[in-house]
Amino acid sequence: MQTLPAHPAPPAHTSLVAVGDSFTEGMSDLLPDGSYRGWADLLAARMAARTPGFRYANLAVRGKLIAQIVDEQVGVAAAMGADVVTLVGGLNDVLRPKCDMGRVRGLLTEAVERLAPACGQLVLMRSPGRQGPVLERFRPRMEELYACVDDLAETHGALVVDLYGAPALADPRLWDVDRLHLTAEGHRRVAEAVWQTLGYEAEDPEWRTPMPPTVPPGWLTRRIADVRFAREHLLPWIGRRLTGRSSGDGRPPKRPELLPYADPARPPAPDRPAHSARPAATADAELP
């Protein structure tokens, strides 16, 4: 009689390269030293904990458009020949008032066509989006982008992590005060989603489960949050758009080389979620 193993063997991934923008850089999972951690670092820590000599590079830089990702990151990532490459890009383009979706699709296709044959496994994502009226304005573009992601994955054998289809990640409490980036708990859930998609045994099978309901903040609290948001985030964002600047201009990647991961500490346990150093947003709109 044939005996089947109790659990399938875990994947033997020895290296990870992350490509993208602020979502992959790790904003706003702020560490005490002022740097950002994020889902890609958490994922690398998990993979390194079970694979001696595991190597990791994170080429993502905040504010990058898909053309910049293709020009500055894709070739570098392809040359590294990693076991796993994650690619998340295009959303910064989609959330701008003027966007050529045909060009975005073409550049994303170029990125996938260059990365897929150069790595063991390419991972794409349908990025999460929080609830609010601004998102509704851009939802058709987002869904067009994600349809392109699905088509490219099917054509090139990439995996897709569907964060857009996870209602738990739309909860405003998982988003930072800038209403654009996830808190530490949001990033933890994303790391779990990618971990499971890669074939590892779930550490948090309930990552899609919404947070427990709480009493909504009152009108005055929401208006105070709106004023703070406009002053600290919306007005600077508009200023950068008007002057053609980006928050990532001149900023290098935090891990530009594929090197052994120096801190293999495991991420926070599901029952003790980490929290951002700044409070999550409490109002009902978000910044594109």
Image: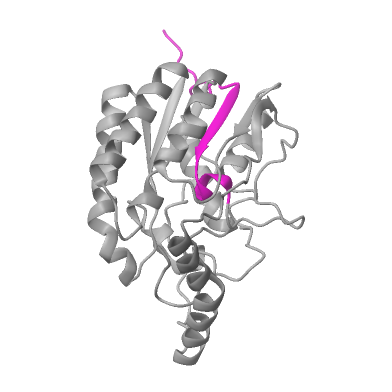
Placement of the C terminus among the 4 image quadrants: bottom left
Q: Is residue 218 left or right of residue 256?
A: left
Q: Nearer the viewer, residue 16 or 247?
A: 247
Q: Residue furthest front?
A: 243
Question: Going by the picture, which residue comes out furthest to the top?
Answer: 1
Query: Which quadrant of the figure has residue 257?
Result: top right
Q: Which quadrant of the rendered structure holds the N terminus?
A: top left
Whether residue 118 is visible here, answered yes or no, is: yes
Residues in magenta, as a range: 1-26
Q: Viewed as shown, does residue 276 lie left or right of 90?
A: right
Examine the residues drawn in magenta and state their main secondary structure: loop
- Residue appearing at x 61%, y 55% in the figure: 29
Instruction: Please indicate, yes or no, whether residue 7 appears anywhere in the rendered image.
Output: no
Residue shown at 46%/56% (left/top)?
244
Q: Nearer the viewer, residue 71 or 52?
A: 71
| Residue found at x 63% / y 30% | 56
Q: Give percent across and percent down for residue 235.
A: 49, 73
Residue 102: image location, x then y, percent: 23, 41
Residue 33 higher or lower than 133, as above or below: above
Is residue 7 located in the magenta-colored stretch of the structure?
yes
Q: Residue 59: horizontal and vertical position, in percent?
A: 57, 36
Against 124, residue 251 (above or below) is: below
